Image (cartoon, helix red, strand yellow):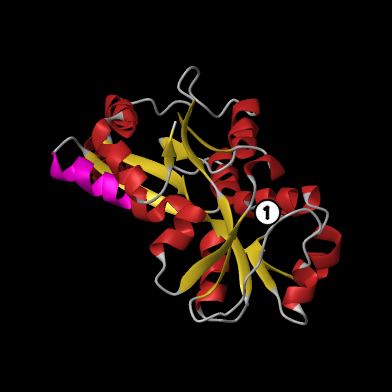
Amino acid sequence: MTHHNNTLNKIYALMFYMALVLLTFILPSAYADDGQSNKVRIFSAGSTINAVTDICNLFIEKKMGEITPSFAASSTLAKQIDQGAPADIYLSANPKWMDFLEKNNMLEPGTRFDLLGNRIVLIAPLNSTMTITIDKGFDLAGVLGDEKLAMGDPDHVPAGIYGKQALESLGVWDSVTLKVARSKDVRAALALVERAEAPLGIVYSTDAAISKKVKVVGVFPEESHPPIIYPVALVAGNATPSARSFMEFLKGEDAKAIFEKYGFNVR
């Protein structure tokens, strides 16, 4: 009987020890989660890096809350959110990827709206002597020669998608499709031209505006591609008061001034 009691005591002691170990891990994480509830996470298109970083910093300076931005191609971010990445707000450079998340019920109903507009331009290194008039059938292939045209991958990067649509409508896409250096996002395309690894690139006018190493050599006609619209929305299940507060901040005058400083059209 004594042996039996000793065995039971050992089992109870082991169970008690295991419970303590579990509590050691569970309690801190529970408090940590609670402490993070005021921290907003925004996934934002790569072309908004400068403006959104400034807006986040201002939001924090005004003691309105904590916010952490993450930047990448809109397609990459949308796919990450769809796979469960921890984002509260999604700012896309293309309605297509916002539609993708909406179709998959990944957006908080009623929170989506169009925030910004932009233009696409043709850029060259600052010391380039190229002069190009963008119009129907212009000889982009001839200007490029054996060189490459830098642009976001037109299969999924919004700036590349708009660029391809513009070139198709102007009747020159087929002549340059094999000359395209497909970049992971628009900033990577900008970097290729900044380093003179490509003589020409297609980027947003806002990207060209923040670089001291490139110049705009042509602006694509607005009618050559669909309107460039940046929609924003809350991610489903993450409509916290802090996230809603930042969404309102994005609509405000302070944010508008910053977006316009970087060349965006605030809608």
Instruction: Write the residue at 27% across / 27% down.
Output: 245
Q: Amino acid at mark 1?
A: Gly
Give the residues in magenta: 53-62
Mark 1 lies on a secondary structure that is: helix
Q: Which residue is mark 1?
A: 163
Nearer the observer, 111 or 22: 111
Q: Which quadrant holds the C terminus?
A: top left
Residue 77 placement (x, y as % from top left): 53, 47
Up/down of 127 relative to 57, above or below: below
> Residue farthest to the right?
174
Residue 121 placement (x, y as % from top left): 58, 57
Instruction: Write the residue at 40% across / 54% down.
Output: 49
User: Can residue 9 be seen in this snapshot?
Assistant: no
User: Can residue 233 be seen in this snapshot?
Assistant: yes
Nearer the observer, 100 or 93: 93
**Residue 60 figure quarter:** top left
Instruction: Write the residue at 47% across / 62% down.
Output: 208
> Residue farthest to the top?
110
Residue 164 placement (x, y as % from top left): 73, 53
Chief secondary structure of the magenta span? helix
Describe residue 4's horizontal placement relative to residue 233 as left or right: left
